[in-house]
Image: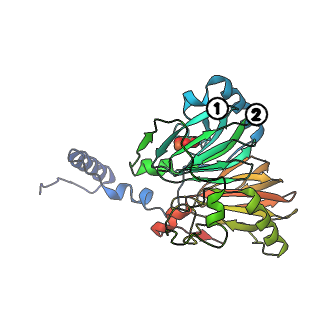
């Protein structure tokens, strides 16, 4: 060891000695943990994500203009990314999830491809466009929750006479965090479908399973339709099964395991009676909400966000929030909770 000459232990000298030492170790690609320890092992979750809300009136207008700027075929996917205001340029709504609004005009096709990132669609507006997933066509209606799991071939088409708009949520930032992205295009823009519309929901979502059904982390149900799910939250509410924070809420489940529908993203649908004043809640999973019906507001930290049909908003990890419903309202929500649970790092503060 070299003999560092420290004539007196004045603060100034100590600082100079340390700086010199840091410069020296830097040449060996090393750095002193003690200078950054408090930033990397924080007492509580630290997030770069900020609360934000996107009004559907704005989305609809701006998306309509996107239809004039580019075709779905040219764009491959005509999507406007909902970028968290504190994560601009990073193509994400939270640190782990991507969200975007997709538009497909009458007669258009978004060609078949597959990728490692899993996607979900939550249908906002229009009627009669479809997404085809692993050989099953899912005709889209508002409120439908549609899965496009990891590596599932998928294409979208709109044979209807109305524009079709939906929310996409993908685990892209996480897949890219792990640097594990692959993707593939198919020669045929539109995949051949082997199953009838709604087969997967009937086969797997009816309390029975086809004999010998494989148990998988990925739900075999392609489309959890609003027509099937909405009456269930209505019954829950009528039965008085209303959580003080979350309302009358169901979890979209994988019928082969009872777990989440996908290993990376978990979703719920909640009904609030008119006048519902939710108690505050927080959890470590930053959560994306969509108002499927009604009108209300959500207090996130010190800010209040007013929402109505098809507005999208995001709650950062560990931010305290509470919902209030002016009318009977339905909120869809999705987060990275299954990933956090799989890693044993998910926490809530009830
Ligand atoms: O619809 O296949 O928003 O691959 C981003 C990537 C949608 C899609 C997105 C995609 C898609
Ligand atoms: Fe895709």
Residue found at x 63% / y 57%: 334
Would you name the residue on which mark 2 appears? 161
Where residue 142 appears, x then y in whole percent?
75, 49
Residue 24 vs residue 221, the one in the foreground: 221
Residue found at x 26% / y 49%: 22
Where residue 32 appears, x then y in whole percent?
30, 55
Say whether residue 51 is visible.
Answer: no
**Quarter holding residue 155:** top right
Would you name the residue on which mark 1 appears? 108
* Coloring scheme used: rainbow
Where residue 206 appears, x then y in whole percent?
67, 69
Q: Is residue 181 left or right of residue 147?
A: left
Say whether residue 145 is visible.
Answer: yes
Which image quarter holds the N terminus?
A: bottom left
Using a 10 Å C-alpha cutoff, classify the residue at mark 2 as few (fewer than 14 neighbours), some (14 to 19) or many (20 or more): few
Where residue 193 appears, x then y in whole percent?
57, 47
Q: Secondary structure at mark 1?
A: loop
Using a 10 Å C-alpha cutoff, classify the residue at mark 1 as few (fewer than 14 neighbours), some (14 to 19) or many (20 or more): some
Q: Secondary structure at mark 2?
A: loop
Residue 308 vs residue 229, the one in the foreground: 229
Residue 344 vs residue 155, the one in the foreground: 155
Q: Is residue 255 above or below residue 307?
A: below
Q: Is residue 168 left or right of residue 8?
A: right
Q: Earlier in the sequence, mark 1 or mark 2?
A: 1
**Quarter holding residue 131:** top right
Q: Is residue 56 above or below residue 303?
A: above
Marks 1/2: CA–CA distance: 11 Å
The tally of labels here is: 2
Ligand 1 within 8 A of label 1's CB? no
């Amino acid at each position: 060891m070299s003999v560092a000459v420290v004539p007196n232990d004045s603060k100034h000298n100590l600082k100079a000695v340390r700086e010199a030492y840091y410069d020296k170790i830097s040449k060996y690609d090393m750095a002193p943990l003690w200078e950054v320890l408090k930033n990397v092992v924080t007492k509580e979750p630290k997030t770069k994500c900020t609360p934000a809300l996107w009004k559907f009136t704005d989305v609809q207008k701006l998306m309509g203009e996107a239809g004039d700027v580019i075709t779905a075929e040219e764009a491959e996917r005509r999507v406007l990314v909902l970028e968290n205001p504190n994560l601009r340029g990073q193509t994400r709504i939270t640190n782990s999830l991507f969200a975007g609004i997709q538009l497909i005009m009458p007669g258009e096709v978004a060609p078949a491809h597959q990728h490692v990132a899993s996607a979900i669609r939550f249908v906002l507006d229009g009627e009669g466009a479809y997404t085809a997933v692993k050989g099953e066509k899912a005709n889209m209606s508002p409120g439908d929750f549609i899965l496009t799991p990891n590596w599932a071939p998928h294409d979208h088409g709109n044979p209807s006479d109305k524009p079709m708009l939906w929310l996409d949520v993908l685990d892209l930032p996480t897949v890219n965090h792990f640097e594990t992205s692959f993707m593939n295009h198919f020669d045929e823009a539109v995949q051949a479908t082997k199953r009838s519309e709604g087969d997967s929901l009937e086969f797997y979502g009816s309390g029975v399973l086809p004999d010998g059904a494989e148990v998988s982390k990925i739900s075999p149900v392609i489309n959890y339709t609003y027509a099937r799910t909405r009456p269930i939250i209505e019954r829950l509410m009528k039965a008085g099964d209303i959580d003080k924070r979350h309302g009358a809420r169901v979890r979209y489940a994988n019928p082969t395991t009872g777990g989440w529908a996908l290993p990376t993203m978990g979703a719920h649908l909640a009904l609030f009676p008119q006048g519902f004043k939710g108690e505050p809640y927080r959890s470590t999973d930053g959560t994306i909400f969509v108002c499927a019906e009604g009108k209300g507001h959500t207090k996130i930290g010190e800010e209040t966000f007013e929402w109505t049909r098809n507005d999208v908003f995001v709650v950062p990890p560990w931010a305290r929030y509470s919902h209030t419903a002016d009318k009977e309202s339905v909120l869809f929500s999705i987060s990275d909770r299954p990933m956090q649970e799989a890693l044993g790092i998910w926490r809530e503060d009830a």
